[in-house]
Amino acid sequence: MAKRKTIFYIWKSAYPWDVRVEKICMALLEANYDVYIVCKWEGEELEEEIVNGLNILRVGYKESSQKYSPFPFNPFWKKSIESLIQKHKPDLLINREIILAEISGKLAKKYNIPIVMDMAENYPAAMKNWKKYNDSFLKRFIFNTLEIAYKLESFCLKLMTGVLVVCTENKNRLIYNYKFNKDNIKIIYNTPSIKSFNFKRDEVDREFKTIAYHGYINNERNLEIFLDVAKDFSDLNFDIWGKITSESTIKEDFNIYSNINFYGEYDLNSLKEIIKDTDIGVLPYKIDEHINNTISNKLFDYMANGIPVITSKAIPMTTLIDEYHNGVYYDFSDRNGIRKCLSELNKYDWQQLGKNGRKAFLQEFNWENDKKKLIEFIGALI
């Protein structure tokens, strides 16, 4: 019997837990690979353990967290990853995003191991939006003016055997900007499993009055502007679920309105129940280079539940809506577009839009399909 092949998934943060890390690694485990998640120790009791069949290896166990801050060229991460490679002799490395990709890529080359970058988003563009990279003149100069993150991405991609992306737009960006071989890029959406949900909003007979947002809440989500208009539509309910970043005062600003409700942070297991109160999902994101090269997993969650959506004009979302007719989109760059959207809700057959979304989910946008594509792509590399 042939020896089972070993895969390292290198992740800059703690595990458990990250939904995409879990889905990809569990899919590979089910495909008969030995899977190791090499991650950062952030106070967990054990340095090594097995979680749901996945081998967890924690870097920097009981050492200073700052010493093992994930950044390019960190010698402590390099030493740890190399030691684990020597010990476990993986047949493939998968590195999440660009932060540790230079280290992983050079080690992959040194030990003649194929390596894949799991690019869940356009990371350099995302960094431009994050407060921690914009809170001083020096950081703004480094990340915005000098565009160091893009230079790092360009360098790291030269070390990669393949790349996983979450939408066509990001695949095209890599081909156009970096001349990366299109055959070595695979789109693996952040879709839920067919077994994840059992709610079918498209089969429920009730008015479409509750518009909900589920997810992280920060300035990029454009919720402040959306709710500033939504407060005037007293005949509609707006349910907001998710963790609010410390710099946002959104709850204090809008919780005073009777039609706007904040329910706080939730875990993925509870989403199955709380989403049942949703009639229409909203994704009002600001339009920039980051959002135009990724696609929210919440869009697929809504589709899985037969919930229609209203979105801003982010290219990946409008492309999907144009093809599958699972919702509508408007210009949410200012209050006029949002007001127009909420004023025109009665124009649409929301039941049918939800039905269209659920059909597209069952036929194409589900984890069972993405898992099959992932296994085929990885199998061709090792």
Image: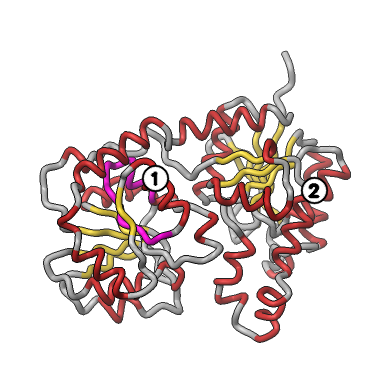
Identity, as a three-letter code, of the amino acid under mark 1: Phe
Residue placed under numbered mark 1 in the picture: 300
Q: Residue at x 41, y 46 (%)?
A: 320
**Quadrant of image for the C terminus:** top right
Residue placed under numbered mark 2 in the picture: 159
Q: Residue at x 67, y 67 (%)?
A: 65
* Image-based side of 280 in relation to 242, left or right: left
Q: CA distance from mark 1 to mark 2?
A: 32 Å
Whether residue 93 is visible here, answered yes or no, is no
**Label 1: few (<14), some (14–19) or many (≥20) C-alpha neighbours in 10 Å:** many
Q: Residue furthest right?
A: 110
Magenta residues? 299-313
As for residue 304 lying within the magenta part, the answer is yes
Q: Helix, strand, or loop for circle 2?
A: loop
**Quadrant of image for the N terminus:** top right
Q: Residue 215, relative to residue 336: is it above or below?
A: above
